[in-house]
Image (cartoon, rainbow, N blue to C red):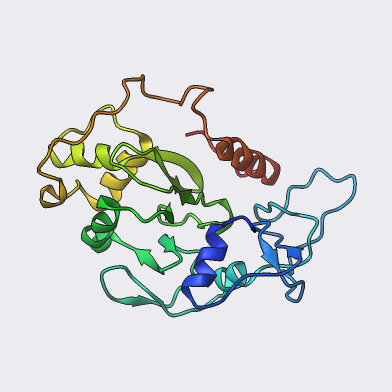
Amino acid sequence: MSKLTASRMFAQSLGVEVTGPGECYYCSGPCLRTTVHGEPPPLLGSRRPPAVPAKCPSSPYMCPGCQRWKNKRSMTPYMGGGFETKPAREGSWWVAPAGSWRLRRESGPDLYKRLAAPPCEFALMLTDPGVENHIQLAVVNVNAVVKAETQLYLTLNNQIVEFSTYELYQTARGEVTGLEPGTQALVRFFGPFPKELVPKEEAPQQESRGRGRPSHRDKDPRIDAQKKVLRESGKETVT
């Protein structure tokens, strides 16, 4: 089975299936080798980084998901209502096979309803104004079962950060210190988690561990893979 990427889920949410023997220049997902991406080709012996982050820089093709993400103009819906005609790469997004939506401050209530009981597959990408959202750098959460304490991931300005539904419950109780960067970002973008969405029963406690960077044992290998892509494109930042 082909690997699941945010670009593929984005295409699926638009009713487009992504298959083919080729690899996409941007996300390295499958493609039909019919659509050329148009980025400058890599120069042998040159240290010049790619114009944009690319997971398969030797490929001249792009997949339907990345093609639609790159469109200069497209009518796309906001979660919670409303539409936008700006390029998809401008702004924050929720992407899942069942549906993809732009996000803004007013999307908070609907987004938190989804995060109260997250789907098994989704990607969450948050960007500050002026930061281009690279869907090829999004991390896809894939879990057979999602519990309150399950470690989840989102990208904040194209950098992978962690959060959990349990920590969102804590923000509803007014706890704002010692939280994962992803949880802090969600509160900054959308406000605290609504109290009415917190289960009446006590949420399970997470394993006690220090904050900051995850231990080498617990580190998600996708973080190192993404840092490599960012480093090669000259876009890695310190988080």
Q: Residue at x 50, y 43 (%)?
A: 159
Closest to the observer: 140 or 130?
Answer: 140
Vertical position of residue 72 compared to residue 238: above or below: below
- Image height check: is 166 above or below 82? above
- Asked if one can make out residue 218 in the rendered structure from this viewpoint, the answer is yes
Q: Position of residue 221 (x, y in %)?
A: 58, 35
Q: Quadrant of residue 163?
A: top left
Task: Look at the picture and state if 214 lies above or below 155.
Answer: above
Q: Is residue 87 visible to the viewer in this orientation of the structure?
A: no
The image shows residue 226 at horizontal and vertical percentages of 60, 42
Q: Residue at x 85, y 46 (%)?
A: 46
Number of numbered labels in the structure image: 0
Residue at the right extreme, as displayed: 44
Residue that appears at 65% across and 52% down: 53
| Percent position of residue 25, x then y | 71, 60
* Above or below: residue 61 compared with residue 214: below
Front residue of this view, candidates 157 and 141: 141
Relative to residue 63, is residue 129 drawn left or right?
left
**Quarter of the rendering occupied by the N terminus:** bottom right
Q: Is residue 87 left or right of residue 43?
A: left
Residue 75 occupies quadrant: bottom left
Residue toward you, 49 or 67: 67
Given residues 29 and 212, the one toward you in this image is 29
Q: Position of residue 73 (x, y in %)?
A: 51, 78
